[in-house]
Image (cartoon, grey):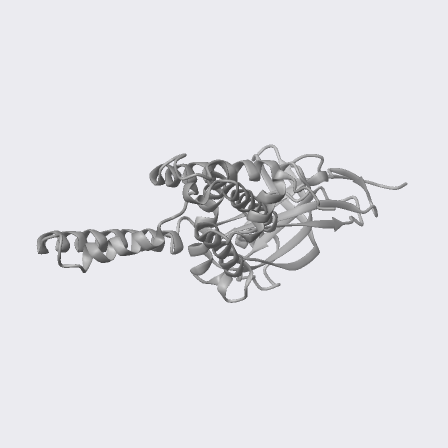
Amino acid sequence: MERTQHPYDTVIDAFVLMRIPRDLLACYLWLAAALLAIYAPYLNESFLRVLFGVPLVLFIPGYALIAALFPAARDIDGIERVALSFGLSIAIVPLTGLALNYTPWGIRLDPIVTCLCIITVGLCLVAQYRRARVPENERFTVPFQAMRQALFDEFFKKSGSSRTDRILSLILLIAIIAAVVTTAYVIIVPKEGEKFTEFFILGDNQKAADYPTTFLVGTNNSLYIGIGNHEYRTVNYTVETYLLNMSFDETTNTTSLGAMTLLDRFTVPVPDNQTVVRPYFFTATTTKFNRVEFLLFNETVPDDQITGMDRINQSYRDLHLWVTIGSLH
């Protein structure tokens, strides 16, 4: 008994047998190259990361969406496709980041790259499927061969245009290439701005509240220490924490240091343009202290003989937390 073919079977067969359109194939290949440039050793530290990453953010997702929405050549012209590709990419990427902000993964490199890959590949597959349903002579195709031939005729073919026109066209081409190269250079090698380091402490749930300000001797207390590196290089920071006894003289309106004891010292390597937040635990052994001091040093750490206010003043950044320490008895 002969099986009756469903109408959609023909479409699915055409979708499977149809070769991947060259423009969608270029999207796949660019996506693969961008992933290599982002994650492959050595490549992820070169200019290729920016070269392949910028179009992945600013053009390709929007182009894949336009290809899925308008599979036929008559739908919109080429200039509209390019313009809408940039505009929709600028809309898709921030919305993706906004959605990730409400997930456990957050706005980080791996989740963003994963989402962009899923969106791009999914839209390209939808575009390929929808083009398979359009008659072949009506499908949208990027005329790579015609574009290449037109460029060759414009700059190298002698007939059809005067020598002056060819020279002017060549100057225009050189100007466009120079503009693209200059733009890429500015993006890849940005001018260094102000160099600074963020140093902060956070309470429970990594918020700027609920700090341990009142506790008992011998109890374990916790908070978070954060360091943001904007020094345009990787820095191995050194963090020192102290318990201090500070007194205030109302007659002179000044504070003086009565006692200072080291709690902890540790190193935190932070890559350029990244922020590291780590939990920190401390315990007080006596009630005579009323302040917890946090000192941050970059590569230059003073000698241990330098103590007291001199050491605090020589730190790169310093923070403090006023506390009240009670006795167990």
Residue 197 in picture, x, y percent from top left: 51, 49
Quadrant the C terminus occupies: top right
Q: Quadrant of residue 237?
A: bottom right
As drawn, the residue found furthest toward the right would be: 329
Q: Residue at x 75, y 50 (%)?
A: 281
Q: Quadrant of residue 252?
A: top right
Q: Is residue 60 visible?
A: yes
| Foreground residue among 68 and 28 | 68
Residue 284 in picture, x, y percent from top left: 78, 48
On the rendered structure, is 220 left or right of 37? right
On the rendered structure, is 190 left or right of 93? left
- How many dots with numbers? 0
| Foreground residue among 201 and 272 | 272
| Foreground residue among 71 and 181 | 71
Q: Is residue 108 visible?
A: no
As drawn, the residue found furthest toward the top would be: 250
As drawn, the residue found furthest toward the front would be: 1
Residue 174 in picture, x, y percent from top left: 22, 56
Q: Residue at x 61, y 38 (%)?
A: 7
